[in-house]
Amino acid sequence: MNTAVLNPSKKINLLGMTLKEIEDFFASIYQKPFRAKQLIKWIHQRGVSDFNLMTDFSKELRVLLTDRCEIRSPKVSYEKISIDGTKKWIIDVGENDSVEMVLIPEGDRSTLCVSSQVGCAINCSFCATGKQGFSRNLTSDEIIGQVWIAANSFGLPRTATDRNITNVVMMGMGEPLHNFDPVVKSMDLMLDTNAYCLSKRKVTLSTSGLVPEIDKLSKVSDVSLTISLHAPNDELRNTLVPINKKYPIQELLDAVKRYVESCDDKRITTIEYILIDQVNDSLEIARELADLLMQLPCKINLIPFNSFDESDYVKPSGNRVRRFKDYLIERGYITTVRSTRGDDIMAACGQLVGQVNDKTKRKERLNRAKIEVQAI
Ligand code: SAH
Ligand code: SF4
């Protein structure tokens, strides 16, 4: 339930509510359930936030909704466009916190990379977001609000047939499975035929590997799952993705297998593998990775490490990347190398930080990350 619903002194923000939640709300004001579908279409298919423009509602209903509700997205602080067309938005989510989202146009596709948390508690050693510590989870208004803002950026008024965003990946700031309910609600809206109407294969959740939450997800959703693996053995992965100490590789792969089995169609999981020079990019490691992944139908996406100020890691040479990739292909894996997009505006993978310049705040966030991660 949207927390604002429980707080009568505040206007109820309808932006992040699922169809079911809006139906319940409408029932509470004696409106028929089909009104909820109409409302969701106005919000998410047409990008409308003014109830007075909702012409298929009676005057009384429009007045009542204006009185008690709102459709409020987070504020955009500023936007940047890369020379390659990648667009990054810095989104103000209050109290000096911000998150980033990135839109990557590629031919007739447009992929939106959405944030789920302010910072991240997982603290992977190669990730700029993790280095910022953790501030808080985003609400569903703030998560789906990113999609809403990006969809509106193609121009208003939108029509119900505009489908400008073709793919959404939960790969921005944060660990989406560490913010389970708001992320699942937002993904429901992405899939909802009355809202963004994306297919489950075009909505992707990427995780560092929270095993119980993968099982929990399999009970409520069947979006595409991507695993940020980055190493073929626990010793190495422990140093890169610290949550591996709690959920080691084999437990993670077993959970992925259960997830895939729970989907009613044949799924190939994507394995994300960041390549860091001299750390996890040797041929021996490629061999170990190929052996390990034989147990799972998967394809491998290699991401050459993107640098940022506070990291000593180095991006491997093109030759080393090619060698690693060719070996995996030889072993029969569909293997791609993710092209770096938007790095001139710091919008590439792992470069999203949401700008935390205040030192005291930074310290607080690092402490919060430690507490949060212990609770996982
Ligand atoms: N927390 C989730 C989703 C966000 S991270 C996860 O870890 O999967 C999204 C992707 O960016 C992950 O695959 C992550 O490994 C990658 N990434 C993080 N830091 C990076 C960096 N410095 N260079 C390249 N990719 C990076
Ligand atoms: Fe968090 Fe993902 Fe970055 Fe790891 S890679 S710190 S899980 S955002």
Image (spheres, rainbow, N blue to C red):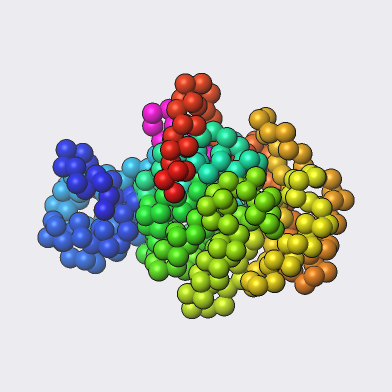
Residue 148, percent across and down? 43, 49
Asked whether residue 256 appears in the rendered view, the answer is no
- The answer to which image quadrant residue 12 occupies is top left
Residue at 41% over, 63% down: 216
| Image-based side of 183 in relation to 61, left or right | right
* Quarter of the rendering containing residue 343: top right
Q: Residue at x 21, y 66 (%)?
A: 33
| Left or right for 293, reference 31 | right
Does residue 171 sit above or below 160 in this rendering? Answer: above
Point out the residue furthest to the left here: 30
Check if residue 110 falls in the magenta segment. Answer: no
Q: What span is colored magenta in the figure?
A: 93-101
298 to 153, vertically: above or below: below
Q: Is residue 6 visible?
A: yes
Q: Nearer the viewer, residue 69 or 250?
A: 250
**Residue 103 in the image: above or below residue 248:** above
* x 77%, y 42%: residue: 315
